[in-house]
Image (spheres, rainbow, N blue to C red):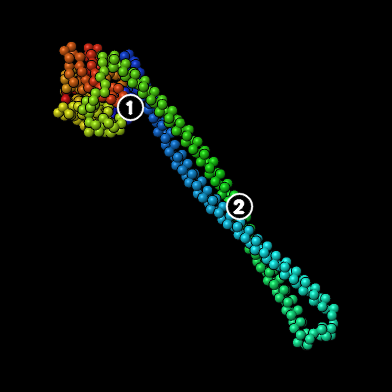
Amino acid sequence: MVRTKFLIFTILTSVLLVGATLISGQVKADQFDTQIQALKEQNAANQAVANSLAATAASYQQAVDALNAKIDSLQSAIVATQNQIDSLQKQIDVAQAELDHEKLVLGENIKTMYLEGDVSTLEVLASSKNLSDFVNKQEYRNSVSNKIKGSVEKIDSLKAQLQSKQHQQQDLLKDQQSQQSQLQADESQQAQLLGYTEGQKATYDAQIKNNNAQIASLRAQQAAAYAAYLRRGGITSYGVGEAGNGGYPSEWANAYQDTRLDSWGMYNRECVSYVAWKVDSTGHHMPYWGSEDANAYNWINLANSYHIPNGTDPQSGAVVVWGHNDGMGWLGHVAYVESVNSDGSIEVSQYNVIHGQFSRMHVDTGTAQSLHYIYF
């Protein structure tokens, strides 16, 4: 059984040893374990980089969004400025039409006055009914001339003002368009950085996915190696999927493997967790071993340190340990002895021989390797 500090690595496996190759009929831990651990470390490093890239991408995205908002706002201002320029142009056109008309009237009036200027004062006076009529004609002529000249000057002044405003708006439009061009260039640069960053993140995500696939493959090989080891150890049959998981508490049985700590500080749905619960549920004292080196193969040493009897004779209610001091480095397995048969074989209940699940198993102790028992 994988030691508690490494149990999180066995979520998808049917084994509780980390890494296995068959050497002289036993399971070596440092092969798959080293590869899986290396891949996990790569994933941790890759995930850290991916998270950093995601944060950077989010920052670039915020910058792009902010620039786009400014570009849109400036575009609205540009449209408003252009509308103002168009409105002023219409007013200038109206003023120009009025100016042309007034100039035409003034021209006709000057022409009339010029023609009338060829008539002598005596002739005008002679054609007038009286002196008052003569004076009125002269005043009217001068008044019309002055009025037309005043209108022309007024219209010219208005036109000049409108043109000045239009020039100001045109300068403003050029400035706005220049700002918009710069913002668009900045937005394009940020968008390129965003695309590059997202591409980098996708590369790391793909590597993480690929590593996870390799880990799953290694765990499948690990499971096969462990099953082969157990067969060499005298196991002749399995019974998987018993209703109620052998009574193992639902809060641990129904959670994903290695996501909860049990009352003894060991991860759920592991062999050590199930056996610790089973020992306690049968009224025996189960020490808190989660904070210690509670690999399954080390349970004998732990039992000795707690002065708990142990030996090589199978007994009902005992805990059977595979792998104690086998010298091969594998992390062992523990199960609860439900009964001992007349031929010396045993019936056990356990967790995580198959995919983190509860199972029952018949073990031929005559051919089993490295079996040891703890009598809690």
Amino acid at dot 1: Thr
Residue 178: mark in rendering = 2
Q: Which residue is drawn at 83% across and 76% down?
A: 115
Q: Residues within 10 Å of mark 1 (few under 14, many from 20)?
A: many
The residue that label 1 is drawn on is 10
Quarter of the C terminus within the rendering: top left
Mark 1, secondary structure of its residue: helix
Across the whole image, how many numbered discs are drawn on residues? 2
Q: How far apart are marks 1 and 2 (CA)?
A: 61 Å
Examine the image and state in which quarter residue 335 appears: top left
Q: Which residue is drawn at 72% across and 79% down?
A: 143
Question: Could you tell me residue 336's position as x and y percent?
Answer: 21, 22
Mark 2, secondary structure of its residue: helix
- From this view, report whether residue 16 is shown above or below residue 64: above
Q: Which residue is drawn at 74% across and 71% down?
A: 105
- From this view, report whether residue 346 is shown above or below residue 159: above
